[in-house]
């Protein structure tokens, strides 16, 4: 029997949010928090191939969302889903460990500046 060594727990290299735009195509948009543009362009191409014509209520969407999540995990991309306000299925594929700092976000710094 061959022993398989566990992979190192490497940090994520990118963070994206896949947003459902609504019932009119194009249904999906990718918002980038951070990461290498070439890597994210390649990832977005694969995501579009899986989700291009699928609204979130299509039965095929659930299967393809899992495929996108597995692809993101292989690439070490944090992939969050924003399926709309009325949907409790918004998910994240990778979570930050307690005590581990998340990479800086321009959105959070802008929000903090606007509150002052």
Image (tube, rainbow, N blue to C red):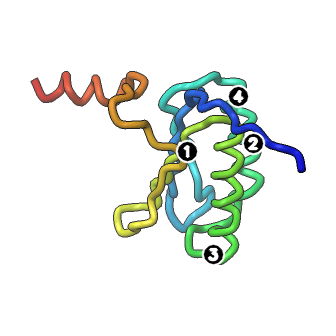
The disc, 2 or 4, on the residue closer to the chain's N-terminal end is: 4
Residue 42: % across, % down: 75, 35
On screen, 10 above or below 69?
A: above
For mark 3, does the 10 Å Cα neighbourhood hold few (<14), some (14 to 19), or many (20 or more) residues? few
Q: Do the residues labelled 3 and 2 touch (CB within 8 Å)?
A: no
C-alpha distance separating marks 2 and 4: 10 Å
Q: Quadrant of residue 88?
A: bottom left
Q: Is mark 1 on a helix, strand or loop?
A: strand
Residue 74: % across, % down: 71, 41
C-alpha distance separating marks 2 and 1: 15 Å
On screen, 40 above or below 63?
A: above
Disc 2 marks which residue? 45
The disc, 3 or 2, on the residue closer to the chain's N-terminal end is: 2
- Depth check, front residue: 84 or 94: 94
C-alpha distance separating marks 1 and 3: 20 Å
Q: Which of marks 4 and 3 is in front?
A: 4
For mark 1, does the 10 Å Cα neighbourhood hold few (<14), some (14 to 19), or many (20 or more) residues? many
- Depth check, front residue: 85 or 9: 9
Q: Do the residues labelled 2 and 1 touch (CB within 8 Å)?
A: no
Q: Residue at x 60, y 37 (%)?
A: 77
Q: Which residue is drawn at 65% across and 77% down?
A: 59
Residue at the bottom extreme, as displayed = 59
Q: Which residue is drawn at 62% across and 56% down?
A: 26
C-alpha distance separating marks 3 and 2: 20 Å
Q: Which of marks 2 and 4 is in front?
A: 4
Disc 1 marks which residue? 79
Q: Is residue 3 left or right of residue 6?
A: right
Disc 4 marks which residue? 39
Residue at the left extreme, as displayed = 116
């Amino acid at each position: 029997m061959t022993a398989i060594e566990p992979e190192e727990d490497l940090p994520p290299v990118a963070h994206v949010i896949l947003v459902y735009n609504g019932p009119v195509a194009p249904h999906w948009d990718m918002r980038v928090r951070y990461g290498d543009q070439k890597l994210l362009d390649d990832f977005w191409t694969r995501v579009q191939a899986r989700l291009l014509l699928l609204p979130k209520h299509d039965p095929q969407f659930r299967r393809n969302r899992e495929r996108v999540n597995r692809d993101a995990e292989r690439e070490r991309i944090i992939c969050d889903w924003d399926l709309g306000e009325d949907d409790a299925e918004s998910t994240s594929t990778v979570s930050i460990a307690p005590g581990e700092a998340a990479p800086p976000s321009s959105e959070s710094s802008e929000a903090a500046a606007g509150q002052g």
